[in-house]
């Protein structure tokens, strides 16, 4: 028996492998549309704006990118989990604390899923959340500054993949662990003790309504399986959360085979409203844990990192009616909830059908205790009792599903490289279209919300092969834009992406554009080393530390000549950009600095640390072409040997140290 399953599993994997590296679909795909029509649909006239912001995860680059739709134009990279030399993110003294973790400074992550904030399950345009998969973290990005404002680490997690999906009113973002692990405070156990000691922690990270401030409200200690993806309920199911699981075999080696044994894994249904009740009743237990909470303040233009030492946990064994398993064929990946909140779609990577579960039936099965035994003490509901129905023979390797708001779902198929549209009520396939090639996530504007904006779907493809001019062994991943406004999906555009986009969300520009922040007000700048005008610029020595209170304005720095720095000093350039006009950043770079430049926005203060390594006169300059005389925006720092008695002097123009020296000579 076991052998037969093994064979089937291995066979399916062989197909997976073969298909994924041998795209066979017609690569021209010109049959389904006229090129002229497509060009017109994606043409955004010079000087006009795109209709949608497409907020795209960067995958292994750890960032977010912002793309306009339908043009496919890249507008920005927002640094999140990875250092970004272009802006000094993670290099400047102000932003280094954002990348602090319980492991220390972690300057990289792997980010898969974007979640835009919602109110009543509809986009509200305030924040984007994104997961750090490798060193478990969730970040919150402001959609008015397009900057990362907060990062919280997730303890008791072995990889934050099932994250950061949000509840209807953004009460919570969740973090389900991909790897079950022993709890952080009892972690030194044999790997072979998986079944006894490993747990699948699911964290509920609360989000403050006004500030967006995050905090881990509680963690659920669930059986040791792998959590893959998740979605919150909506409407009538808004008090629930649904998580797909795999490795319910609880294997700890060669998962490729060992975690594909069972015919069905589970979707975990969590009654999070009930969890809140248990917490209010005092059923939670504080457990030791260590995690970092990093917050960036727009007032001080600086981040702080706090290490927190305990976390509230709920043990389902002491909290009945909190969790239920719904059997789901086979190794489910995506777990998506339709706009009404009635249907939950599982996408089994190795399944031949797409199962659609009914929320009403689930409640009924719970009420009637229509169980099929239990898994580690958690009731397993009977498959037939919770099933709305199955979509038969939809394609090979279903991964993710989104909704068009017109009663249809669109599912991505990695193995058969296609998008398949099907009717949710009737469970019938109504259209299919090839992707080039091996699509992962797909994204319909508003597709995961109660109010899909429809119009387009973007396929994020894992393999590009021959789609673009070749660029050596590494090729860009590709996004493909399809028109879904009619009955037939039509391919409109291919565009390369940055990093590996797993998931993305798109939101109408009108919901974001009006809140766009243009400058930081200088008078509101509370940075401890701010200089609000050139009169406030100075250089202060504190032992070996030298603090330069510096300003920039078109087209000079103040001071731009500094003398009296010695080898062994640690110099901090605190640069305040005095500009109060939109789109006038100044950059700042020093020869031989062992970090990066800083790029300082109007009204902002940012600090570059510099430890001189050589005696001599070191140039520094502005890196951003800010004016006709940008190239003149430069200066010098004189570094003398340790112990030299060159006095500390500084200045600009008439006040610069050499001008002063000349004046003194003249007096004599
Ligand atoms: Cu399908 Cu990490 Cu969401 Cu990628 S995951 S595709
Ligand atoms: Cu400032 Cu160029």
Image: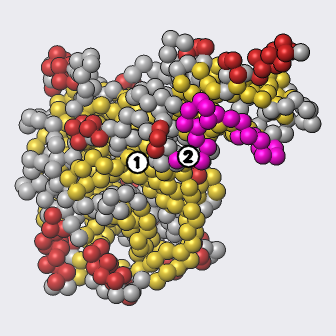
Q: Nearer the viewer, mark 1 or mark 2?
A: 2
Q: Determine whether, in the image, residue 291 is placed left or right of residue 476.
A: right
Query: Which colour style is shown?
Result: secondary structure
Question: Which x, y percent locates residue 276?
Answer: 32, 78
Mark 1 or mark 2: whose residue is earlier in sequence? 1
What span is colored magenta in the figure?
526-547
Name the residue rendered at 58%, 41% in the picture. Answer: 530
Instruction: Establish if 98 lies above or below 668.
Output: below
Q: Determine whether, in the image, residue 82 is placed left or right of residue 12.
A: right
Q: Nearer the viewer, residue 384 or 321?
A: 321
Task: Give the CA separation, mark 1 to mark 2.
Answer: 21 Å
Question: Which x, y percent locates residue 175?
Answer: 41, 62
Name the residue rendered at 57%, 58% in the picture. Answer: 305
533 inside magenta stretch = yes
Instruction: Establish if 87 lies above or below 385.
Output: above
66 inside magenta stretch = no
The image quadrant where one finds the N terminus is bottom left
Name the residue rendered at 51%, 31% in the picture. Answer: 578
């Amino acid at each position: 028996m076991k052998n037969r399953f093994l064979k089937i599993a291995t066979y399916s994997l062989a197909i997976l492998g073969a298909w994924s590296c041998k795209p066979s679909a017609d690569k021209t795909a010109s049959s389904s549309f006229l090129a002229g029509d497509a060009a017109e649909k994606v043409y955004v006239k010079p000087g006009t704006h795109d209709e949608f912001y497409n907020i795209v995860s960067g995958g292994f680059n750890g960032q977010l990118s912002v793309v306009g739709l339908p043009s496919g134009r890249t507008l920005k990279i927002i640094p999140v989990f990875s250092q970004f030399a272009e802006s000094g993110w993670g290099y400047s003294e102000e932003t280094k604390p954002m990348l602090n973790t319980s492991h220390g400074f972690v300057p990289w992550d792997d980010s898969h899923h974007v979640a835009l904030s919602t109110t009543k399950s509809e986009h509200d345009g305030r924040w984007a959340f994104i997961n750090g998969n490798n060193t478990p973290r969730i970040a919150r990005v402001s959609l008015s500054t397009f900057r990362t404002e907060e990062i919280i680490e997730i303890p008791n997690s072995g990889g934050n993949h099932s994250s950061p999906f949000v509840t209807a009113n953004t009460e919570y973002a969740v973090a389900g662990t991909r790897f079950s692990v022993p709890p952080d405070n009892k972690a030194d156990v044999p790997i072979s003790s998986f079944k006894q000691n490993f747990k699948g922690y699911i964290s509920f990270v609360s989000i403050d309504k006004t500030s967006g401030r995050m905090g881990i409200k509680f963690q659920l200690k669930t059986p040791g399986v792998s959590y893959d993806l998740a979605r919150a309920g909506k409407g009538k199911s808004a008090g629930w959360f649904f998580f797909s699981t795999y490795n319910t075999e609880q294997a700890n080696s060669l998962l490729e085979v060992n975690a594909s044994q069972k015919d069905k894994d589970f979707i975990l249904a969590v009654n999070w409203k009930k969890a809140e009740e248990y917490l209010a009743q005092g059923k939670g237990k504080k457990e030791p844990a260590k995690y970092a909470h990093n917050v960036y303040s727009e007032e001080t233009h600086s981040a702080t990192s706090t290490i927190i030492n305990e976390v509230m946990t709920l043990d389902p064994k002491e909290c009945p009616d909190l969790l239920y398993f719904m059997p789901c064929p086979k190794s489910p990946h995506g777990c998506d909830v339709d706009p009404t909140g009635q249907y939950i779609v599982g996408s089994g990577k190795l399944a031949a059908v797409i199962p659609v579960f009914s929320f009403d039936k689930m409640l009924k099965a719970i009420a009637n205790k229509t169980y099929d035994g239990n898994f580690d003490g958690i009731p397993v509901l009977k498959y037939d009792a919770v099933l709305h129905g199955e979509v038969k023979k939809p394609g090979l390797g279903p991964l993710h599903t989104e909704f068009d708001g017109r009663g249809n779902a669109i599912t991505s198929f990695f193995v058969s490289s296609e998008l398949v549209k099907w009717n949710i009520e009737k469970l019938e396939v109504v259209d299919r279209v090839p992707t080039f090639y091996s699509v992962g996530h797909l994204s319909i504007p508003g597709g995961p919300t109660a109010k899909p904006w429809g119009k387009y779907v973007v396929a994020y493809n894992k393999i590009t092969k021959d789609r673009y001019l070749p660029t050596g062994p590494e090729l860009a991943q590709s996004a493909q834009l399809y028109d879904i406004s009619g009955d037939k999906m039509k391919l409109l555009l291919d565009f390369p992406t940055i990093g590996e986009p797993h998931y993305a969300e798109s939101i109408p520009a009108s919901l974001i554009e009006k809140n766009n922040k243009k400058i930081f007000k200088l008078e509101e700048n509370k940075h401890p080393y701010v200089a609000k005008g050139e009169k406030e610029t100075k250089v202060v020595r504190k032992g070996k530390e030298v603090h330069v209170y510096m300003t920039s304005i078109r087209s000079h720095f103040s001071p731009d000549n500094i003398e009296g720095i010695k080898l062994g000093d640690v110099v901090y350039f605190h640069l305040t950009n005095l500009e109060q006009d939109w789109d006038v950043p100044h950059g700042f770079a020093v020869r031989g600095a062992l970090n990066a430049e800083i790029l300082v926005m109007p009204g902002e203060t940012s600090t570059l640390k510099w430890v001189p390594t050589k005696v001599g006169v070191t140039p520094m300059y502005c890196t951003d072409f800010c004016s006709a005389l940008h190239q003149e925006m430069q200066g010098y720092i004189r570094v003398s040997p340790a112990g030299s008695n060159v006095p500390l002097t500084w200045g600009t123009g008439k006040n610069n140290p050499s001008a002063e020296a000349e004046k003194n000579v003249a007096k004599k």
